[in-house]
Amino acid sequence: MDASLRISEIFYSLQGESNTVGLPTVFIRLTGCPLRCNYCDTAYAFTGGEKRSLQQILDQVKTYSTSYITVTGGEPLAQPACIDLLLNLLDAGYQVSLETSGALDVSKVDSRVVKVMDLKTPSSQEMQRNLYGNIQYLTAQDQVKFVIANEEDYQWSKQQLSEHDLSGRCQVLFSPVMDVMPAKDLADKILQDQLPVRFQIQLHKYLWNDARGK
């Protein structure tokens, strides 16, 4: 456990997205990200943070009474020791999910980790960073997420859904960009087209707006 990571924050909140939405969860937000998505809401995690050992991280996680841990960013896989952190959390008995941009290789992520992986839509302005080879490493427990801001994003997401048979491989999440794509509009589109996806909103933003540590 000699590895260390630069950490932006560790906090306890309700899971706001994914298929565990609403469950009390410890979030470990790693510092740094090679992407600059147009709709990013965690730009404060691009730089700064505090260097902490794996043991220090695990000790803080133990102070919260939950078995659910989400490792997020930034882009957590930008720090190689993220793989060690995930392994140590799993071995400690936690149910671990990883929120990743989909732009970095996920092949070394332990198969017990629930991967929540973005495919970047056109409005993100980072679509060219999608590493489509990652799709082969997604399983039924994993989730692929599309963050949708407009009609172009929606149509592109539908195309990826079909082209890669995503709903046959893993769970698929369609999420509106808050204050840009009206949630009802996206929900109506999904129902009209009878898509095999899970509609989601960012619960934490409805509860606490953009407050950090929530």
Image (tube, rainbow, N blue to C red):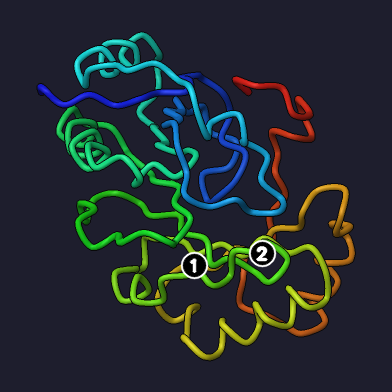
Position of residue 33 relative to residue 212, above or below, is below
Work out which residue is located at the far bottom of the displayed protein and give it.
163
Residue ID for mark 1:
129
Name the residue nearer the viewer: 23 or 13. 13
Q: Image quarter for residue 14?
A: top right
Where does residue 101 sit, x and y in percent of width and height? 48, 55
Position of residue 68 relative to residue 148, above or below, is above
Position of residue 83 relative to residue 175, above or below, is above
Q: Which mark is residue 125?
A: 2
Label 2 sits on a secondary structure element that is loop
| Tag 1: amino acid | Arg
Where does residue 111 sit, x and y in percent of width and height? 22, 56
Label 1 sits on a secondary structure element that is helix
Q: CA distance from mark 1 to mark 2?
A: 9 Å
The quarter of the picture where the N terminus appears is top left
Which residue is at a point 39% across and 16% down the rendered structure image? 50
Q: Image quarter for residue 7?
A: top left
Q: Is residue 172 left or right of residue 93?
A: right
